[in-house]
Each structure stands twice: as structure tokens, then as C-alpha cells.
Image (cartoon, coloured by chain):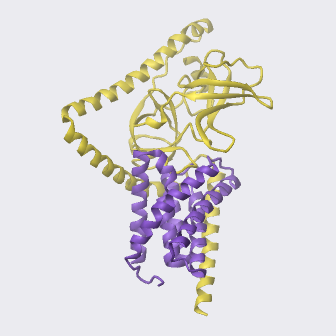
Amino acid sequence: MARGLATNKSRLLLAGLVLGHLVAISKQVDVGDGATLFERWLFAVLSPLQGLISGGVDGVGGTWSNYVSLRGVREENERLRDRLAVTELLLQQRTHRAREAERLRELLQLRAVLPLEVLVAEVIARDGVPWFRTVTIDKGSQQGVALNAPVISPNGVVGRVIRLGPDAAVVQLLLDQESGVGVRIERSRVTGVVAGQVDSAGQLTGDLQMKYVPMLADVVEGDLVITSGLDRIHPAGLVVGRVRQVTLGTGLFKEILVAPSARFDKLEEVLVVRTPLPDVSATETVQ
Amino acid sequence: MRVFWTAVALVAALAVQTALSLIGPGWARILDPFLLVVVYCGLKGGETHGMLAGAAAGWMQDVHFGGRVLGLAGLTKVLVGFGVGLAGTRFQLTEPGARLLVVVMAVLLDALVLRQLAGAFDVTTGSLTVGGLAVRAGVNAAIGMPLFALLERRRWPGSRA
């Protein structure tokens, strides 16, 4: 009798939990990319815990490294690495601007170059499940990070912020199948969207797939792929990767594989763009 | 007291998963310490404990390692916790062989349910090959079995014999 009651109780609980989860998940799906209050609250409560753990892991590793190496040299190295990251980004932008200057002059639409205000953030956790590709960074809303803020590295675009806490944020990597970045081929100006590529078994391969490129579009292997700015999230002109393979698809579009420029397996520090994205018409002329 | 130890186990799982993700991301995608906590709670505490531990574990995993939509791992692990708890009350699952089977089944159920749920809610996810699943099941079983045996030495308050 008692066992029967307990079983009924647990089944009621199961039904309640399943229903609650379905409602919670459905609500997010309806909302789309916007963060709900509940989501923000939950992440705010739980993210400091991960920060503490990451701090602990880093602390143990750091103590040992500092013991072995000279403290001064290590600190100077970190400082120089930070400066190098920013410098490489500036160099990347300037190289790109130089290539585009001729076209800009011809169009007589030379406008002020977009200065990108960026924030250096440290990766405190990487993806822990096989289903998604995310990293957690140690900067959140209190440091000025916004939801959907583009995240880049000196090598190229990394992804965008999908979950925000006061002192931490989760970044969806370009490698994730759910990601989607508006891009264009720098040489031919052909536009498309890139997202994580999966093989026939459904496994993420580490490459990107450029979608919605018409069969007749001019794309060849080795072409540089940059952000188009048309997604209203990523500023135009940032390097995404290089075309690795172009094949004729079965439908209306080409099948294009892109090797990402960012080294996702070696991400330690990233740059979060804080500058609000200007109008698309403006970003197109900035390159 | 049981709640306290479950919370401790979940925090330990988060610590292990975070540390693994920093040290070796490949390993973090194979070993699922949250799943091991859910399986153990289900085995020792029955379906209610398994479900509640599953909900907590799944949400922690969702918030820290999940994608755009939260709750997929939460619901998955609720179902895994319920399944393991139900099996624990119906069958004698104290032998190592039986527990090995439970961990393997739990890993398979976890992957299957999450994939189906993601599909139902139009969330695209990566997936595992049969080989990848086998490795994931094997590694979790290889780590879970001795861990469970170690925890067996400590009796949970109110646990079944």
C-alpha cells in the first residue's frame, strides 16, 4: 500500500518535472535568441561557482608554474601576450582596410573607419558535452558585455555571447551547428552564412559550412571569408576563415567548406566587441 | 542529509567537468560526471531521488555547458534518473555486472533522449557515432564502477539496503 502511494507520488513528480521542463524549453524557443529573466537569474547564481572552480584549477596550476619559472618573466609574458593580441587584431583590420581602400575610393563613399572597442576576457571553461560547442568567459554584464556581443580572437571570429551573467558569459562558438554568421567572400563579394559543419554521422568536424551560395557564384578554394555585417551581430570585415573545398551541391546551392581562422582548441583569451553595430549600409563601406 | 550529499556530489561533478574542459576538452566530452551522480542517486534512492538529482544535474550542465536552449539536459537527466530509479526498485542491481549494464544503458538513454528532444524543439546539436557512444559508455562505466564501489562503503541516510 505504502509502496503504491510512493510510486504514485514519484510518477506525479515525474509528470510535473517533465511538464515544467517542456514549458521552460518551449518558452525559450518562442523567445528565440533573447535571454529570459529566468535564464539570466539562473546563470547569475551558478556562474560564480564555475568561476571559483576555474580559479581553483588555475590557482593550483599557477602556483606550480610560478614556482618553476621566474615570477617576473611570467607576468611580463602575460602582459606582452595581451598587447600582442590587441596589436594583431589592429594589424588584421588595417591590412583588410588597405585592400579595400581602392574600392572605397572608386565608390566615393569613404567614411570613417569603425573603431572597435574591445574587452579582453579569459576563457574559464570549455565545452563539456559532445552536443554543443561553447566556452565560458570571465567577463559579464558588469564589465559591459552584452547578449549577442561578437567574440573574436587575433586569428579570427570566435562566436557570440548567448548567455550572460554579472561576471561571466557563455559564448557559442562558430563550430556549433546552431551558430550562424553572415559572411562574404572577400574577393568576389559573394555572401552566405557559416555554421558548424557536421559529417554524415552527425559529428561536428571542426570545419565550417558556408550555406546559401548559389551554384553560379564565384567561389574558389583559398578564398578569404570575412564577416558581412548583414547578420546585424558581427561587424563587417572580420576574418572568419578560408575556403577549403567547393563542390556542387545537390540542390540550388554550392557546398562550401571553410577552415576557420580562430584556433578554437587553443583559446585562452578572447576579445569581446563592445561597440554597438552601426547600420549595415555603413559597415559595408568600412572595409 | 541526503540532499546535502547530493549537492556535494553535483558540485564535485561541476568541478571535474570544468577542470576536464580546461585540461582536455576531448575527455570532457566523453566523461559525464553529472550522469554518474544521477545514476548513483537513482540506484540508491529510487526514482524520486534519481529524478530530482537528474533535474539539478541537468540544469547545472545546461547552464554551464549547454547551447542556446536551456532545459534539454535537465529533462533528459530527469528521465534517466527516473528510469534508473525505477529499475533499481524492480531489479536487484547491486552486482557489478548489473551496475555496469545500468551505466551503459544510462549513457545510451542520455544520448538518445537529448538528441530526440533537441530535434523536437528544433535545436541542432552535434551527435556521436556508434563508436563514440561506445567509448563514452565504456569510459563512464570504467570510472563509475569503482566510484560507486567506493561510495558503497558509506551508507546513505535513509537509503535502501
Q: Position of residue B146 (x, y in %)?
A: 43, 66
Q: Quadrant of the N terminus of chain A?
A: bottom right
Looking at the image, residue B73 sits to the left or right of residue A191; the answer is: left
Quadrant in which the C terminus of chain A appears:
top right
Would you identify the image quadrant in which residue A14 lies? bottom right
Q: Residue at x 24, y 33 (%)?
A: A74
Residue A156 x %, y %: 50, 27
Identify the chain drawn in yellow.
Answer: A
Instruction: Judge whether A9 appears above or below B96 on screen.
Output: below
The residue sitting at the bottom extreme is: A1
Q: Nearer the viewer, residue A79 or B113?
A: B113
Q: Quadrant of residue B70?
A: bottom right
The quadrant in which residue A76 appears is top left
Q: Position of residue A57 (x, y in %)?
A: 33, 50
Coordinates of residue A54 in the picture (x, y in percent): 36, 49
The tint chain B carries is purple
Q: Residue at x 24, y 44 (%)?
A: A64
- B87 or A184, nearer to the observer: B87
